[in-house]
Image (cartoon, grey):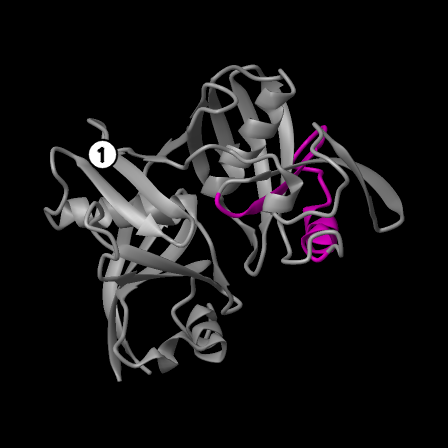
């Protein structure tokens, strides 16, 4: 079976984007893991599968699969790449488009400088929404990991995130603590682990160990989660530059009850096909 795909990335967070195949066997975890292999397959952090719209007010419905083959709820940079691809194909209206996903509608717009902005919805700090085992919502929670106790913030941006504040992202033990946080029993559906360095009220640095993908060069929902946690604690302003290993994202959040916006560049790396 031949599958045509587009390889894209948003500041280093890379994807393959393809239309949903009529035979769902391609979406089985083992086949997706083989495609995600960076030596024997195509290589990607997430696969984005485009399907017919399920709502009249959206252009399409998309599904997200991590490199380990598991389906997840949302992907911020993925949504930005899909919007950019549809704009490249002439399918946006005045630079705007609405997408549908397992986590709900995503409103996207193409800015004058070709950056793509997406409305990621209202951050949800209810621990049950991740889910995360806690008695009540709080600004921070103690989490025992690897023989030490970390202070974490948790928030859902359509998908679950835990955020740890560190002195420096360069020296943060992301490869060792990331997997332990991801698979911690208090997160029954696993979690994305963000390591946040506060630079100023308008700038932060971030590394994310993504659930099912490992550390990535960028994570859009992770950037939103980090800013939301920091802003809830009164540490950053509404508009924040987020430095990641693949470049820079921008996050804007007015505060509780308001939607959070993610913005940044996207690129089409190449188009191709694969026989499965």
Q: Quadrant of the C terminus?
A: bottom left
Residue 145 image offset from top left, x and y in percent: 82, 48
Return the x and y of residue 203 as percentages of the image width and height.
Answer: 53, 21
Residue 127 appears anywhere in the view: yes
Within-10-Å neighbours for mark 1: few <14, some 14–19, many 20+: many
Q: Would residue 199 be counted in the magenta stretch?
A: no
Outermost residue on the right side: it is 147
Lateral position of residue 163 relative to residue 113, left or right: right
Determine the residue positioned at 33% across, 42% down. 106
Magenta region includes residue 178: yes
At 85% from the left edge and 40% from the top edge, which residue is drawn?
Answer: 149
Residue 91 drawn at (x, y percent): 12, 47
Total labels: the figure holds: 1
Answer above or below: position of 119 versus 62: above
Q: Which residue is mark 1?
A: 110
Residue 244 in sight: no
Asked where in the image residue 227 lies, by quadrant, the reply is: top right
Q: Is residue 275 left or right of residue 253?
A: left
Q: Which residues are magenta?
A: 158-183
Question: Could you say where residue 221 lies in the image, as x and y percent from the top left?
Answer: 48, 41
Residue 194: which quarter of the image?
top right
Asked if residue 14 lies left or right of residue 199, the reply is left
Q: Residue at x 70, y 27 (%)?
A: 139
- Residue 58 or residue 274, whichever sits in front: 58
The quadrant holding residue 18 is bottom left
Q: What SS does tag 1 mark?
A: strand
Task: Looking at the picture, tell me which residue is in the foreground, 127 or 65.
Answer: 127
Which residue is at 77% across, 35% downward? 141
């Amino acid at each position: 079976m031949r599958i045509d795909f587009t390889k894209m990335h948003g500041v280093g967070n890379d994807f393959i984007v393809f239309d949903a195949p009529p035979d769902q066997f391609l979406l089985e975890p083992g086949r997706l893991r083989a495609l995600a292999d960076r030596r024997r397959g195509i290589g990607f952090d997430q696969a984005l599968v485009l399907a017919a719209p399920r709502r009249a007010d959206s252009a399409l419905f998309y599904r997200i699969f991590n490199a380990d083959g598991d389906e997840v709820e949302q992907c911020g940079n993925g949504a930005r790449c899909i919007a950019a691809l549809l704009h490249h194909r002439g399918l946006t209206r005045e630079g705007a488009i609405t997408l549908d996903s397992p986590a709900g509608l995503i409103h996207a717009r193409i800015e004058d400088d070709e950056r793509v902005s997406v409305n990621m919805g209202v951050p949800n700090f209810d621990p049950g929404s991740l889910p995360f085992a806690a008695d009540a919502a709080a600004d921070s929670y103690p989490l025992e990991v690897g023989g030490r106790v970390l202070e974490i913030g948790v928030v859902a941006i359509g998908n679950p995130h835990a955020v740890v504040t560190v002195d420096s992202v360069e020296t943060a033990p992301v490869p060792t603590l990331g997997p332990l946080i991801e698979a911690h029993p208090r997160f029954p559906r696993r979690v994305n682990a963000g390591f946040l360095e506060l630079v100023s009220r308008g700038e932060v640095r971030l590394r994310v160990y993504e659930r099912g993908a490992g550390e990535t060069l960028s994570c859009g929902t992770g950037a939103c989660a980090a800013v939301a946690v920091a802003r809830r604690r009164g540490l950053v302003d509404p508009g924040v530059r987020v430095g990641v290993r693949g470049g820079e994202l921008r996050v804007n959040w007015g505060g509780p009850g308001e939607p959070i916006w993610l913005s940044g560049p996207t690129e089409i790396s190449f188009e191709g096909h694969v026989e499965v």
